[in-house]
Every structure is written in C-alpha cells, then in structure tokens.
Image (cartoon, helix red, strand yellow):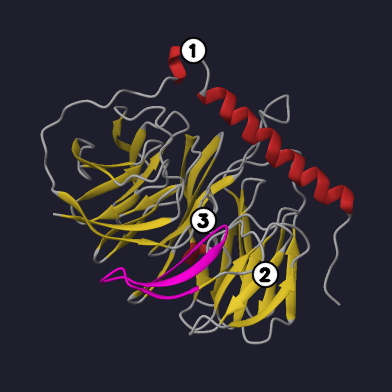
C-alpha cells in the first residue's frame, strides 16, 4: 500500500510555508532603506544579449516552475498547462491542459514527463503528450518532479520523497525525514544522476537515494540550524544540488555553502558561512550564488575562498543563476536578466524579457539562457 500522512502533519507543513511567504513579502515591502531594491545603473557593455524566441506555455508561474531541458527539447509547466518546446526554434511540439492546478514545473527524461498539483496529484505524460497515469502523493508537491532510472520522484510538503514507476505509476518506495516547524518557499530542485536521486531537505541536509529501491546511500548536513525562534532556525537547502566532478555541493538559507568529496565517503572538503534564498550554479572553477540580500558571490571550488562579490543588484530578488560561456546570468523581480563577468563580477549586459518577476531558476543551454517568466512564457536569450 502507498503511505499516508496525517492531517496534522500536512496542516503544519502548509502553515509553515504560508507564514514564511508572508514574512518575505513584508520584508520586501518595508520602508527600511536596507531592503530597498537597488536602482539600475549604467555600465560598459561587455556582451550582446537578444531574445531568440519566446513561446507561451500557459499562464502564471511561481517558484516551483523550473523548466527541464532534455537534448533538443524543453519541458515546462504553468499552473494550467504543460508543454514540450523545441529548443532551437521555440516551436511548441505539444501542450496538455490537466484538469488540476499545477504547483511545480515539469520533470522529464524525454519519454515520460511528470507534473504535480496542489492536492498531491502526480500526472505523467508519454513522449507525445498523452496522459499515461495519475496517482496521489501523500501531500502537496511544490518542487518539480525528477524523472530517471525508471521512476518519477516527487518531494512533498510532509518532507517525504516518493517514487512511482515511470511506465505504470505504481508506488515503488518512499523516504521521509522529520521536518522543521517552518520551511522556505523558494526554488528547489532534485537531481537524478548515476542511479541516484539527490535532494536537499528543509533540515539543511543533502540526501542521496538509490533510485531503484529507495535505499539511502549517503546523507550529511550542509549546515545546522541555529537560533532561538522557528524563523531563525529556517535552514533549507535551496536551489538544486550541484555535482562537480568528485564534489557534491549545496547551499542553505541562513546557513552555509558546503562541498563534499563523493570519492572519499562524502567527507566535507570546505564550507563557508552563507545564506541564499535561490541556490547556486557553477562553471567547474567557481560556484556562483546570490545571498539573501542579493549580493552575488563567486567562490573558488577548490579552496572555498571568495573570489569576488557584486552588490549592484542587491534586494532585486534574484533567481537562481545560470552560467554560459560569456557570463553569469541572473533574473530579477522586474523581468530583467543581468549578465556578470565570470572572472570579476562586472556588469556586462542587461535585457528585459517582460512577463513580470523572474522566479524560476535560469537554465543554461547550448543555445543560450532559458528564462521562464512570471506570466508563463519561455524565453531563450542568446548571449555573445
């Protein structure tokens, strides 16, 4: 039988998410000048950025709506639709409209595409966009499913990671960890790699699970929560875990950025004090992340030492960055995508993609930077 969750646990998780969302809104609407978004400044252009194509997936968006790129295709969702889009041209290859309100982006391996709804319903589509199955997870799902190694995996708001057979929807396994009183509402993603499902947890931990049977292979803290109140103890791993050669790295809110050596039993290699609300990316040499005040940092992946910081975009609510050959790209609350030098953080370029705040993580592709806008469009930005 599939696992069940008590109403008390579910209600506690949802209340925690709602309270933090209200807290974040009040912080950004504060008249305190420390929290005012930085005005955009002039700079010497170092790159040329232009919209290559724009495609409508549906309407609306949010933190959980991250697109997935598989080969030459993009799989994306909005609250009312899921679609497959050609990466080169922006042509919509198929679009489906589930009779449910979706709460997270699409996960796909190219053959099976999965989305999730606010009531915990998980819906899978085949390669042609035809519904294959739908099942119910134990509670709401707010981060994109991950598809790989024959399973569709979701992480629900009761802190349970659940796997379903990619072909049939049959329940395969689940792993649950105790959850905190409050959890962050921001962009989070899981990762499927080398037969493992890797996920961050609201407890500040990373966990690696065998995709075939649900056995926990490794688990360790990125940071440990501290503070006197539930709000001060929020310590979620944010963004997506990063696998960089032998390193597995993660960053938390009100905690640390930590890299572990997978080849040496997952021992910590380095860690630095850090607080991010959006997560990290990398180029194999440096890790890039914006802190909770939206100062962008570059951290050396070998030593953990800070290389540069850029505070010209402070308090502009930056989305998870993407790294392309020409620059580091970040999106902001006004629909701008900013391009920073990878070597020293200088502002190199800026482009408005419209569609409201960029909440979804930016995605680096061979064709450019993929942006999912607040109004449900996918935009590919070419950078030279």
Of callouts 2 and 3, which one flags the residue occurring earlier in the amino acid sequence? 3
Q: Is the stretch drawn in magenta largely helix, strand or loop?
A: strand
The answer to whether any part of residue 260 appears in the image is no
Dot 2 surroundings within 10 Å: few (below 14), some, or many (20 or more)? Answer: many
- Residue 164 pos. (x, y %): 68, 77
Q: Circle 2 sits on which residue? A: 122
Q: Position of residue 152 (x, y in %)?
A: 61, 75
- Seen from this angle, which residue lies furthest top? 32
Residue 217 in magenta stretch: no
> Which stretch appears magenta?
74-95
The residue identified by callout 1 is 32
Q: Residues within 10 Å of mark 1 (few under 14, many from 20)?
A: few
Quadrant in the picture for residue 147: bottom right
Residue 65, disc: 3
**Quadrant of the image occupied by residue 247:** bottom left
User: Is there any visible trace of residue 377 in the rendered image?
Assistant: yes
For the residues marked 1 and 3, what is the alpha-carbon distance in whole angstroms? 31 Å
């Amino acid at each position: 039988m599939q696992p069940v969750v008590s109403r008390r646990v579910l209600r506690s998780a949802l209340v925690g998410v709602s309270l933090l969302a209200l807290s974040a809104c009040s912080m950004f609407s504060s008249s305190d000048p420390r929290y005012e978004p930085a005005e955009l400044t002039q700079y010497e252009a170092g790159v040329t950025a232009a919209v290559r194509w724009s495609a409508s997936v549906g309407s609306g968006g949010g933190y959980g709506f991250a697109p997935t790129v598989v080969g030459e295709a993009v799989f994306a969702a909005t609250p009312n639709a899921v679609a497959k889009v050609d990466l080169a041209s922006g042509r919509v290859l198929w679009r489906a409209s589930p009779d449910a309100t979706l709460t997270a982006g699409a996960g796909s391996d190219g053959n099976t595409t999965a989305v999730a709804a606010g009531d915990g319903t998980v819906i899978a589509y085949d390669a042609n966009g035809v519904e294959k199955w739908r099942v119910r997870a134990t509670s709401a799902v707010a981060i994109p499913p991950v598809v790989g190694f024959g399973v569709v995996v979701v992480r629900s708001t009761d802190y349970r990671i659940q796997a379903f057979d990619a072909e049939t929807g049959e329940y395969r396994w689940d792993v649950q960890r105790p959850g905190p009183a409050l959890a962050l509402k921001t962009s989070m993603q899981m990762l499927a790699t080398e037969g493992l499902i890797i996920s961050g947890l609201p407890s500040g931990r990373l966990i690696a699970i065998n995709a075939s049977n649900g056995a926990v292979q490794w688990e360790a803290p990125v940071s440990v929560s501290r503070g006197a109140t539930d709000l001060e103890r929020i310590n979620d791993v944010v963004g997506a875990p990063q696998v960089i050669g032998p390193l597995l790295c993660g960053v938390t809110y009100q905690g640390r950025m930590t890299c572990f050596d997978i080849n040496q039993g997952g021992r910590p290699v380095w860690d630095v004090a850090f607080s991010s609300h959006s997560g990290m990316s990398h180029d194999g040499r440096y890790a890039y992340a914006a802190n909770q005040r939206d100062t962008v940092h570059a951290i050396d992946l070998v030593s953990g030492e800070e290389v540069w910081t850029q505070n010209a975009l402070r308090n502009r609510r930056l989305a998870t960055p993407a790294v392309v050959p020409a620059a580091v790209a970040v999106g902001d609350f006004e629909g701008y995508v900013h391009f920073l030098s990878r070597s020293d953080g200088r502002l190199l370029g800026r482009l408005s993609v419209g569609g409201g705040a960029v909440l979804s993580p930016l995605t680096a592709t061979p064709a450019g930077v993929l942006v999912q806008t607040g109004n449900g469009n996918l935009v590919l930005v070419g950078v030279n």
